[in-house]
Image: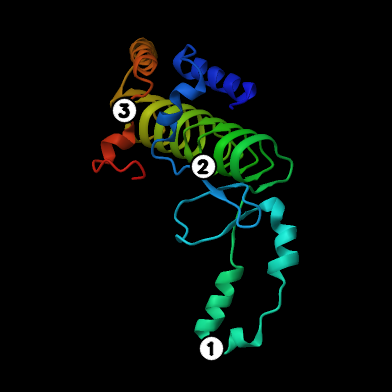
Amino acid sequence: MISKEIQRAWRNTCKILLNEEIGDLEEYEEWLLNYINPVSFKKSAISGKEVIVSSEKACRDAKYLGHAEMEQYLKTIGTKKFDIDDLKDIDSAVTALQERAYYIGNVVLGNSINVETVNRCINSSFIYKTQDVYDCKFVACSPVLRFAEYIFGGNAIGEASRYNIKTFETYKNVRCMETIRNYVASDCYFTGSLESCGNCMFSFNQRNKNYMIGNHQFSQEEYLKLKGKLIDDIRETLKAKKRIPSLLDIINTNGDANG
């Protein structure tokens, strides 16, 4: 169940980016997780309890255990001496090592509070369905972040980014939606490869620019008027369909959600 704090953060982010709330986070979770490597659910080989791990790409016969079971593992398996026959040749040694090798999940460290369905989470709070998150707060469906807040459906989010929906590879990306490789950007929608830009929509490969739509320069007044119409259309489409076309949908023509 998504906490009320994360729901509130989602609603506030939508109001900032789309001028209105658009509904609960659950309604948009499938869209937010598109093009995101989700956490995976396994069973502990020691206890049978659920273990949340960060990838489905482990070998088929891999064994798992939860971080809280590490002490038990070390007492019973991890520090057990090898039989001398296990080291008689390389094949025997590999087999012995495989018997002791486990993937660790449910890793939540440091001062982390109110986190749900996470792995490799350090010093973060109010986090949902996220992995590899460090020193963040109010994040959902977004792997690989540090020093960021109010992030939903993003990936590879750099420090000082906040109020983002569906953004990828960012640094100091503020109040942005559907962006790729924006660095030090603010108030941008459907943009890519921007540096030190603000108030841009559907624009790409720009440096130190403001008030651009489709790579065309507008006055502030003209820009804000057209932006308002575009934001209204984006918001109403999201409300009706629970998703909008992504920049990655355009780039990724093979239909593979993981690119």
Q: Is residue 170 above or below residue 91?
A: above
Q: CA distance from mark 1 to mark 3?
A: 56 Å
Q: Residues within 10 Å of mark 2 (few under 14, many from 20)?
A: many
Disc 3, SS: loop
> Which of the numbered marks, if any, corresponds to residue 245?
3
Q: Residue 151 at x, y = what percent? A: 53, 31
In the picture of the structure, the residue carrying the numbered disc 2 is 143
- Residue nearest the observer in this picture, 186 or 128: 128
Q: Which quadrant of the figure contains the C terminus?
A: top left
The colour scheme used here is rainbow
Q: Residue 241 at x, y = what percent? A: 34, 19
Residue at 38% from the left image edge and 18% from the top image edge: 238
Q: Amino acid at mark 2?
A: Pro
Q: Which quadrant of the figure contains the N terminus?
A: top right
Residue at 53% from the left image edge and 78% from the top image edge: 94
Q: Is residue 106 above or below residue 15?
A: below
In the picture of the structure, the residue carrying the numbered disc 1 is 89
The image quadrant of residue 199 is top left
